[in-house]
Amino acid sequence: MSFVMGLNPMRTTGVKQLWRHACRLVAAAVTVAAISQPAYALIELDITQGNVEPMPIAISPFAGSGLQEDVAGQISQVVAADLQRSGLFRPIDPTAHIQQGMNVGTMPRFGDWRTIGSQALVTGSIAQQANGQIRAEFRLWDVFAGQQLIGQQFFTTPENWRRLAHIISDAVYQRLTGEKGYFDTRVVFIDESGPKDVRRKRLAIMDQDGANVRYLTRGDDLVLTPRFSPVSQEVTYMSYVGGNPQVYLFNIETGQREVLGNFPGMTFAPRFSPDGQKVIMSLQQGSNANLYLMDLRTRRTTRLTNTAAIDTSPSFSPDGSLVVFESDRGGSQQLYVMNSNGSGATRISFGPGQYSTPVWSPRGDLIAFTKVHQGRFMIGVIRPDGKGERILTEGYHNEGPAWSPNGRVLTFFRDTVGEQGGPQVWTVDLTGYNEQLVQTPNFASDPAWSPLLD
Amino acid sequence: MRKALGIERVKVGARLVLATGVLSGCAAMADSGTSLLPLTSDELAVFRDQIAGCWIPPHGSDGVVRLQFDLSRSGELVGTPQVLSSGKSPEYKAAATSAVRAVARCAPYSLPAEKYETWKTVTLNFDLRDMRGY
């Protein structure tokens, strides 16, 4: 904080400033004899703290012409739901809006929006085109500055309306938070149906909000640990075909599936490298497991660790230079970071309990993990140097964190006790306060987030 | 423009920007005074806390946004706050928008009337450097 007197305002520029200089010149001419020191001073303050609360935002129901009236309303509802779920926004109930019946061309009455406490406003219109497509337009307004922040137009087929809503949500999210959104994404997971002792497990995919569930396998073979490529619509996962666990590569667009490598032992915990060109995984030999890297083009495999221990769950740093993994080489399950060539492994977790399933954030600043201590299962984050461990959620059984592509939200699964209990997919953001259940048709486990679809 | 799985995106026409209160700003500035009584540290702290309470720092942003604005004797904002720093990244744009919004949202300000000449023009540095990463 500082108090500065007599700073020269002439260094600022712009039309308003020029006008201001003109005003001052007039004032100076009138009062010049009376002034013996600068006509004004400046207070200068540093604001280093803010109010961490969800931003109140109004999503005015989108206007739709003809056949698109319902679609228009649904799009604005999905945008509001996306923003609400992020925990960073608080959409204001449309029944409380004073200015009703807006379309994308309506000029907002900003006073009305300020009256209901809104800081930002989204308006939009959906119109049918002659070729069967829809034209969608939206604007994001800053209610206090009284100006438009975004205006965009899209053309697509009516069945794409949910994606359209997510793309609008991402644009609003990025303009107001400064970081990329994660709404136009999908999550692969294991759909679990049937009684607890004979669960049918199918690989499935859904939009990040739980809509549009599709099944990718039929449930004949057990499937586990699906992981999205960070750069394409490909998934790697483990499946017990013929009783032998193997790592598979699956292309979601084409449906093509292939076994990765032909190893003497069982392969586990596959995960893509940041460029999507390699898969890092664990190979069990006897009672040990070590980490291997496979180049997807040459299919050449490189051994990364060689210990009389169980090394598993490897995950690359986003720049590809480091790998975090879990190992019991020190006596109990802990997290280690090593160079991507396998050298220089260093333990980073030292708290009480056992640490597993580490996943490096796409932002690079944190590693998420599952921790078990005194019968409680926790999802937490830790910095790559082992400092700053924070538990985000805990309970009877939480497991398998996976990052949203912007590194702000984790998805994981939580199991519930009892005969009727089963796993469900949840999300939690980095504050730990915003925990959300993702509605799925059946029980669901092992979620993994796609990159942004664009 | 971009195309993503059959969705085409284009920018919507010209931005609609409302006129700001330049004339009222002129009136306030012409009203000059002669005394410059500094604000006490308590008065500055109250002022700073008022703004901090109105500011929702964007989660993805980093850096410092510097802006200046004028106040009327009754503590109302005169015109639109002027952003003195510059940047083109999404992080900076979000931060700058949030800072302007905070200043506008917080008005009117409770500041000692007898020291108006001291606080009629204010510069604020909204500093996000230690906020990122939670």
Image (spheres, rainbow, N blue to C red):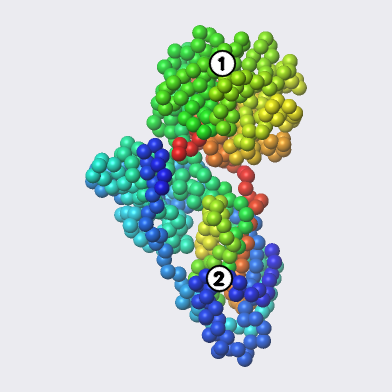
Q: Residues within 10 Å of mark 1 (few under 14, many from 20)?
A: some
- Name which residue lies at 52% across and 13% down: A240
Q: Which of A403 and A440 is in front in this view?
A: A403
Q: Give the residue type at disc 2.
A: Thr
Q: Which comes sooner in the sequence, label 1 or label 2? A: 2
Which residue is farthest bottom?
Answer: A33
Q: In this view, does A34 lie above or below A439?
A: below
Where residue A379 appears, x then y in whole percent? Answer: 61, 31
Give residue B134's position: percent from left, percent from top: 62, 44
Residue A77, by quadrant, is top left
Chain label for disc 2: A
Q: Quadrant of residue A115?
A: bottom left
Amino acid residing under circle 1: Gly
The residue to which callout 1 is attached is A261
Tag 1's secondary structure? loop
Q: In which quarter of the image is the C terminus of chain A?
A: top left
Residue at the top extreme?
A: A242
Question: Percent from the top left, x then y, of residue A185?
Answer: 46, 36
Against A331, is A287 above or below? Answer: above
Q: Name the residue under label 2.
A: A13
